[in-house]
Amino acid sequence: MVKFSKKLKEALPGNDWNFMGMARELPPEHADVVIIGGGIMGWSIAYWLKKKEPRSNTLRVAVVERDLQYSKASTVLSVGGIRQQYSMQENIQMSRFSADFLRSINDYLFVVNQPPIDIQYQPSGYLFLASEEGAAVLEENVQLQRTEGAKVCLLSPAQMKTKFPWLNTDGVALASYGLENEGWFDPWTLLNAFRRKAMSMGVSQSCGEVTSFNLFTKTIVSDEGELLNCSRIRCVNVQLPDSIEYCPITCAIVVNAAGAWSSRVAEMADIGTGPPDSLSGIKLPVEPRKRYVYVWHSPDGPGLECPMLIDTTGAYFRREGVAGNYLGGLSPTEEEEPDIQDLEVDHEFFQEKVWPKLAHRVPHFESLKVKSSWAGYYDYNTFDQSPVIGMHPLVDNLYFATGFSGHGLQQAPAVGEAVAELILNGRFKSIDLEKFSFSRFIKGTKALEKNII
Ligand SMILES: Cc1cc2nc3c(=O)[nH]c(=O)nc-3n(C[C@H](O)[C@H](O)[C@H](O)COP(=O)(O)OP(=O)(O)OC[C@H]3O[C@@H](n4cnc5c(N)ncnc54)[C@H](O)[C@@H]3O)c2cc1C
């Protein structure tokens, strides 16, 4: 086969054409579980499914990813932060699990004959600043975090000044500061570590875009007498890159881990396409929202002791490396939400909205010089900015892991395990994530996290 591939390669134009590589990336005809989206969620779920499969080498898991360069995937465009400081028990528990996982990453994801994994973890506390108005909520959050075992301290403005002399504490009444399990790491390395391990355990990776499903639909009558169309996905259709060809994968279970694009995938299962006031009319409320990250140089800035600082205004920054560079940004208001057609960066947004806030908080940032920038999409849940994890009430073999709205990277190890438990055991075992199920959109009950960045 190698000889055949070599001959073909010589006979055809283009040097990087790889017959075997292409063949390896073709979707399988059948799989037990098809995971749509090969970002951090998709690969974490794939890994945990194989780790937890009841008998080894029995579960056929296929990950389908349309862009193996990951040019627009949130995972590789994120800033890699992990924190314990949340206001919801579930979020604290997930991030605490992830911190333990990352600490022992080689116990989980090491592959024989491959170099050990170094995610370049930078331990550093998050420093959340609160105004007089927000101080009580901050204190309440810290109490809950401590109950969950997180080590977080409260700082008065005077204590902040002693620990961080470069900080202007005007308008700050209280701060919370994480003492362990917080910091940042390299998202690419974590993604590749999950992928490498999952593939070594037999998961297949295919390159292509899922564009439709073959559904089996049955009409049933609900207890209230409403006619409901219940479906099951029989087949996932994958369009191959640069081709009009489709490869169908027949499967038992489908996971929608398509990140910012997951509502499009949901629509393929007719979710949200019914009449507006019906169950089938309820959309998956996840959409791409563009977020800018700016990197600047400030030789006299906070230095090595710089935490990941979250200002009272919502602006954030942290150290980037050790050469006087920092990165940060600010989520726009609803009215300021930028166009999502491309990933162009708006530099005026930095000049007008971000920089004044940074310079107010750190006077040395008055003279900063922006060095680079990028933009990525949050997989933003417009309903309550919390994830959507679990099944859909009308499509009985479709699972979601999406809508993380800016904190999915750090939660991926825990979410992967939770989704694998749900698929294999029919219930959450390690962390109860029922609060994040799709049914809350039907009931209208929000899962509101107060610490969204
Ligand atoms: C600027 C920025 C900063 C962030 N900072 C942090 C942070 O500090 N900490 C943190 O925890 N999180 C952070 N996040 C959020 C985090 O990156 C995301 O929540 C997380 O990466 C989501 O992972 P995912 O796998 O669901 O999505 P993605 O990484 O986007 O992966 C989804 C994949 O699905 C593929 N796909 C979509 N549709 C299809 C289809 N039809 N067929 C095949 N493939 C498809 C896409 O190509 C994509 O690769 C940040 C995000 C951004 C944008």
Image: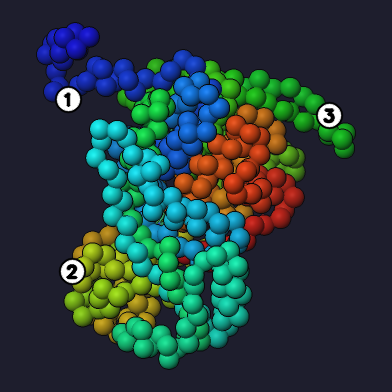
List the residue tagged with mark 2. 323
Earlier in the chain: of badge 2 and badge 3, it is 3
Q: For this view, does 347 lie left or right of residue 260? A: left
User: What amino acid type should be assigned to the residue bearing mark 1?
Assistant: Asp
Going 60% across and 80% down the picture, which residue do you hit? Answer: 136
Q: Report how far apart the C-alphas of labels 2 and 1 lie in the structure.
A: 38 Å
Q: Residue shown at 53%/24% (left/top)?
A: 55
Question: Picture quarter containing residue 427?
Answer: top right
Q: Percent position (x, y) of residue 212?
A: 52, 26
**What residue would you read off at disc 3?**
221
Residue 289: give x, y in percent of width and height. Answer: 46, 53
Question: Residue 169 versus residue 217: which sits nearer the camera?
Answer: 169
Q: Tell me which residue sits at (32%, 87%) in the image.
A: 165
User: Disc number at residue 16?
Assistant: 1
Distance, label 1 to label 3, CA atoms, is 56 Å
The amino acid at mark 3 is Val
How far is mark 2 from mark 3, CA to CA?
65 Å
